[in-house]
Image (tube, rainbow, N blue to C red):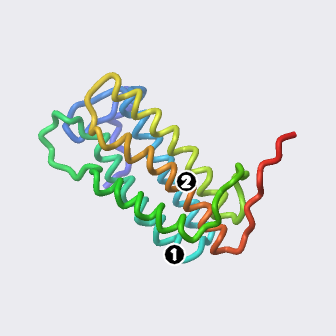
Amino acid sequence: MKIYTRTGDDGTTGLFSGRRVSKASLRIEAHGTIDELNSQLGVARASAPQPEVSTILAHVQSQLFVAGADLATPMDATASIPRIDEGDTQRLEADIDRMTAALSPLRVFILPGGSPAAAHIHLARAISRRAERDVLRLAADEPINPELPVYLNRLSDFLFTLARYENLLAGCEEEPWKPA
């Protein structure tokens, strides 16, 4: 099987519904940002995080494939696919609460960084915020799964907490922001 199909040479791509849309559409832009986020989490995993953090990242990467399928399947499509749901968001919240209990209270802004893995997770956090903005722009134009922007909003909080947790496990101190 060849990796190229040539069907996108005209600037369109196919959704799971079979409909073709412009590669410049809001839906494909949002999908691309989710893909970028997933790839950045792969970079974080490749940078040798603590084993527990690597396991957590693998789960989030899997969920981002669900989010991508969700975006690639309009709400009126007949295709049956898994979608991000409230349970996925609740799992992020439970993990945030569990990790936060192990962290020192945050009283100042911290600079993104620390261990290489934590720095990559911080970058993923920024990408997740862009993904949320992209999904919200799409939602203003057409119906989407209403849980998806909620999940992405929580995911940025989760990734911030996970970066701090990685630094804790790796023995890296957080660097407070000092205004000039």
Q: 29 left or right of 127? A: left
Residue 4 shows up from this direction? yes
Foreground: 141 or 3? 141
Q: Circle 1 is placed at which residue position?
A: 52
Q: Quick one: quadrant of the C terminus?
A: top right
Q: Circle 2 is placed at which residue position?
A: 40
> Comparing marks 2 and 1, which lies closer to the viewer?
1
Residue at (47%, 33%) from the top-left corner? 133
Q: Position of residue 64 (x, y in %)?
A: 39, 53
Amino acid type of the residue tagged 2 in the rendering: Gln
Which comes sooner in the sequence, label 2 or label 1? Answer: 2
The image quarter containing residue 141 is top left
Could you tell me which secondary element the residue under label 2 belongs to? helix
Instruction: Return the residue found at the far top.
Output: 141
Q: Residues within 10 Å of mark 2 (few under 14, many from 20)?
A: many
Amino acid type of the residue tagged 1 in the rendering: Glu
Foreground: 179 or 34? 179
Foreground: 97 or 167? 97
Q: 134 left or right of 101? A: left
Q: Position of residue 123 (x, y in %)?
A: 61, 50
Q: CA distance from mark 2 to mark 1?
A: 18 Å
Instruction: Return the residue found at the far left.
Output: 78
Q: Position of residue 50 (x, y in %)?
A: 59, 75
Residue at (61%, 67%) from the top-left corner? 103
Foreground: 103 or 23? 103
Residue 11 shows up from this direction? no
Position of residue 76 relative to residue 55, above or below, is: above
Position of residue 15 relative to residue 84, above or below, is: above
Q: 104 left or right of 99? A: right
Residue at (64%, 66%) from the top-left corner? 104
